[in-house]
Amino acid sequence: GLTYWTDNADLESSGGAVQAALADDREALRLKDWSGAVVAPRWTGVLTDTLIAEAGGTWSRFEIHGPEEPTAGIRIFDLVTGRAARNPGGVGTRINPSFNYEGSGSISWFLPQAAGRHELKFGGGYTRARIPGHFTQVGDHELRLNNGVPAQVQIQNTPVDVELDEDLVALYVQDKWTIRNKLTLNLGVRYDRVHAFRQDSQQGGG
């Protein structure tokens, strides 16, 4: 099937850096654009009287973009009060999509007469998650206050382009073993592997 949604929302938040109640002006809030899509085909087939197979895959995309406020200036953040002004969360632009590719399949084998009744299932799956990101900072620095008194300047090195990736592999064997219609044992073995890694990032000179 195919599922698609899109939503544009003016959210009173700032990427987790400051709560909306602590925003001193409109530019300390962030406008976020949400969108996504999911495609998930699936096939099931009866191969013989005792064999059933199924296979499928999923492709999905989810995006949360935080465009720069047109009037946002150098961010000011108070380390004591937590109040922020001039800039949404300290970041001018966040382009943050995520993509997932998944495939899985299984074969079920029914054995009615083998020291009882067996329902064997062999299967596995693979998932690749890819999360690229693009970040900029207005003016490449942030001004920090200490309870209203100028205290620090934090220097940035944007634009920054990053990508996080994750591979997931799963293999399993299951056996639903029924003995004399009185006792059922659910047996199985499963193997999972997760490999998360970060690609080389690109960033500005600072």
Image (spheres, rainbow, N blue to C red):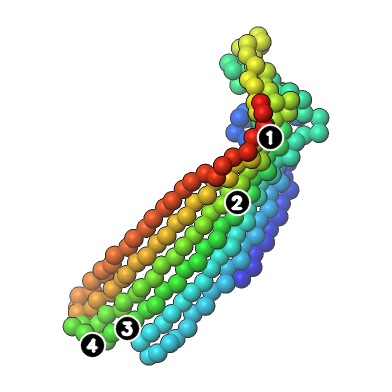
Horizontal and vertical percent position of residue 28: 71, 28
Q: Amino acid at mark 3?
A: Phe
Q: Nearer the viewer, mark 1 or mark 2?
A: 1
Q: Nearer the viewer, mark 2 or mark 4?
A: 2
Q: Nearer the viewer, mark 4 or mark 1?
A: 1
Q: Find residue 128 and report its horizontal and vertical position in percent.
A: 51, 57
Q: Is residue 4 left or right of residue 183?
A: right
Using a 10 Å C-alpha cutoff, classify the residue at mark 1 as few (fewer than 14 neighbours), some (14 to 19) or many (20 or more): some
At 57% from the left edge and 72% from the top edge, which residue is drawn?
41
Q: Which mark is residue 98?
A: 2
- Which residue does the numbered mark 4 point to in the structure image? 113
Mark 2 or mark 3, which is nearer the start of the sequence? 2
For the C terminus, the image quarter is top right
* Earlier sequence position, callout 1 versus callout 2: 2
Of label 4 and label 1, which has the lower sequence position? 4
Q: Residue at x 28, y 85 (%)?
A: 111
Q: How many marks?
A: 4
Taking depth in this image into account, of 171 and 181 the one nearest to the observer is 171
Would you name the residue on which mark 3 appears? Answer: 110
Dot 3 surroundings within 10 Å: few (below 14), some, or many (20 or more)? some
Which label lies toward us, 3 or 1? 1
Give above or below for 11 relative to 45: above
